[in-house]
Each structure stands twice: as structure tokens, then as C-alpha cells.
Amino acid sequence: MKRGDHAVVHRFATACRAGSAGAVRSLLAPEVVAVSDSGGQVAATTDRVRGADQVARCVTHLVGPETVLTVEAVNGRPGVVLRMLGRVVAVLSLNVTGQKVSEVWIVLNPDKLRHWQSRE
């Protein structure tokens, strides 16, 4: 993880915590793409979400008042882990290009999050 990427991810997590779609949008590349995997077990779009406005809305929708966000390495990339009541509910892997997030991979599938639960 490059130092600059880490700073962008921290700003992204802070914007998500604040629930500000505008602040999140400012950190996204205009052509950003988000892909989510719910495994059919959690309500989520199965289509790719494209564009800063749509991705910002998608990401801020995941964060509620009880959500705790931490910045962690996710598959060797900078990422954000979302927890509610101590349980991991989503893992976001971010690809940073320049000073903007260009891809967001969102794992919501409880089966795929199982190993994150044991990392507590």
C-alpha cells in the first residue's frame, strides 16, 4: 500500500463516517466503478454501479449511526472494514489512482466475511 493511497483511504473512511455523500464523491474518480457481492444473502445491487454520484450514494447507504469503520489492508489493497455491534458487515477494497478512488469492491456476503469475524 503506497503512503498516498493510505491517506486517500483514510479521508474516504472519514467521509463515510460523516455520512456525507458529497465528501465521499469528492474522493472518487469521475469514472469510478463499484461492484458488490452479497451472495444473494444480503440486499445489494447485482449490477456494477458507475460514476461518482451513484457510487457515493451506494457507499454512504452502507453506513449507519452504529457502524464502526476501520482502515485495514484488504487483499493487499487499502480498504475499509465496517462493523456493527462488533461484527463485520462489509469489507470495501479500494483501488486508488492518483488521489482518487477508482474502484470499490464491496463484500457483503456473510460466507465471505466469516474469516473477518475470526480476526477480532
Image (cartoon, helix red, strand yellow):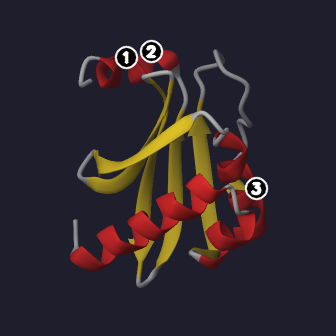
Task: Name the residue nearer the viewer: 85 or 113.
Answer: 85
Q: Which residue is mark 2?
A: 111
Q: Which residue is mark 1?
A: 114
Q: Which mark is residue 32?
A: none
Task: Name the residue nearer the viewer: 13 or 43.
Answer: 13
What residue is rendered at 26% in x and 17% in y?
118
What residue is rendered at 50% in x and 17% in y?
110
Label 2 secondary element: helix
Q: Earlier in the sequence, mark 3 or mark 2?
A: 3
State the separation of the CA atoms marked 3 and 1. 26 Å
Residue 102 can be seen, yes or no: yes
Mark 2 in CB contact with mark 1 (< 8 angstroms) = yes
Tag 2: residue type? Asp
Mark 3 in CB contact with mark 1 (< 8 angstroms) = no
Q: Which residue is mark 3?
A: 57
Tag 1: residue type? Arg
The x, y position of residue 103, in whole percent, is 51, 62
